Image (tube, helix red, strand yellow):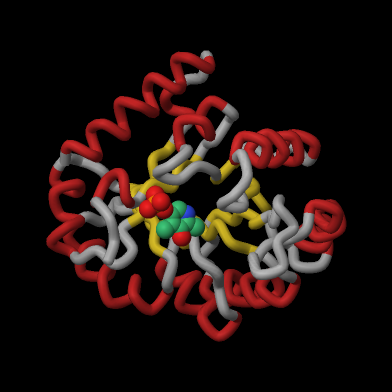
Amino acid sequence: MAGYREVLDNIGKACQLAGRKREAVQLVAVSKTYSEEDIMPLLEAGHRCFGENRVQESQQKWPALKQQFPDIELHLIGPLQSNKTADAVALFDVIHTVDRPKIAKALSKEMASQQKFPKLLVQVNTGEETQKAGILPGELPSFLDACQQDYGLSVEGLMCIPPVDEESALHFALLGKMAKRHGLPGLSMGMSSDYEKAVRLGSTFARVGTAIFGKRD
Ligand SMILES: *Cc1c(COP(=O)(O)O)cnc(C)c1O
């Protein structure tokens, strides 16, 4: 729990430095690979916002915990396959990784049929890396249009994972600019190594795993 407390503390300080309200930033505790047992202390301390990167792993872990703590808020932060959209819509409250028209279309259909409406963020490939998911910055305007016009989706924000070998602040600033240009309030950025920087640059969802739970195997 020392890690958790420290991360909360650091987010508070970063907000103060940036003149931001603390309530503007949500800590998404990334619990992927960690068990119910590892997660329980955070739940008992009152933390409710968690992130997972795999639908299947989440289905095994979270339904039982949700029964015990109904106000848990689950965030999908990993890539979504179209054959998993139904499960994702059923389980998650926020999906950070809308990254192509096929997924937008599948989400739209599922949300309508389940009458369940998770918040949606579009992942942007700010580093234009070939191996990385996300909409290219140049294609963002037309993709956001398509989400709204063609699929009737309301997008609440943008998410990015900066290239490992580049200064992440540049990517956070770029993502912030794009969100502002499109009037989107949500910014999912910052991980264990750079969440304080991300918070200073406007992050509203800090996705932190290792700094809370320790190093994954
Ligand atoms: C695993 C993961 C995180 C958390 O990474 P840490 O370095 O452990 O904080 C954040 N975002 C995404 C998309 C992840 O997959």
Left or right position of 85 against 208: right
* Residue at point 45%, 31% (across, down): 196
* Residue at point 20%, 66% (across, down): 35
Residue 83 in the image: x percent, y percent?
Answer: 55, 85
* Residue at point 57%, 79% (across, down): 81
Q: Quadrant of ligand 1?
A: bottom left
Question: Dividing the picture into quarters, in which one does residue 105 lie?
Answer: bottom right
Residue 61 in the image: x percent, y percent?
Answer: 26, 71
Quadrant of the rendering where the N terminus is positioned: top left
* Residue at point 30%, 53% (across, down): 72
Residue 5 in the image: x percent, y percent?
Answer: 23, 33
Left or right position of 116 against 98: left
Considering depth in this image, is 160 or 216 the residue closer to the camera? 216
Position of residue 131 relative to residue 94, above or below, is: below
Q: Is residue 156 visible?
A: no
Considering depth in this image, is 104 or 30 the residue closer to the camera? 30
Q: Is residue 33 visible?
A: yes
Left or right position of 30 against 197: left
Quadrant of the rendering where the C terminus is positioned: bottom left
Residue 132 in the image: x percent, y percent?
Answer: 64, 65
Considering depth in this image, is 167 or 203 the residue closer to the camera? 167
Position of residue 162 relative to residue 179, above or below, is: below
Position of residue 99 relative to residue 7, above or below, is: below
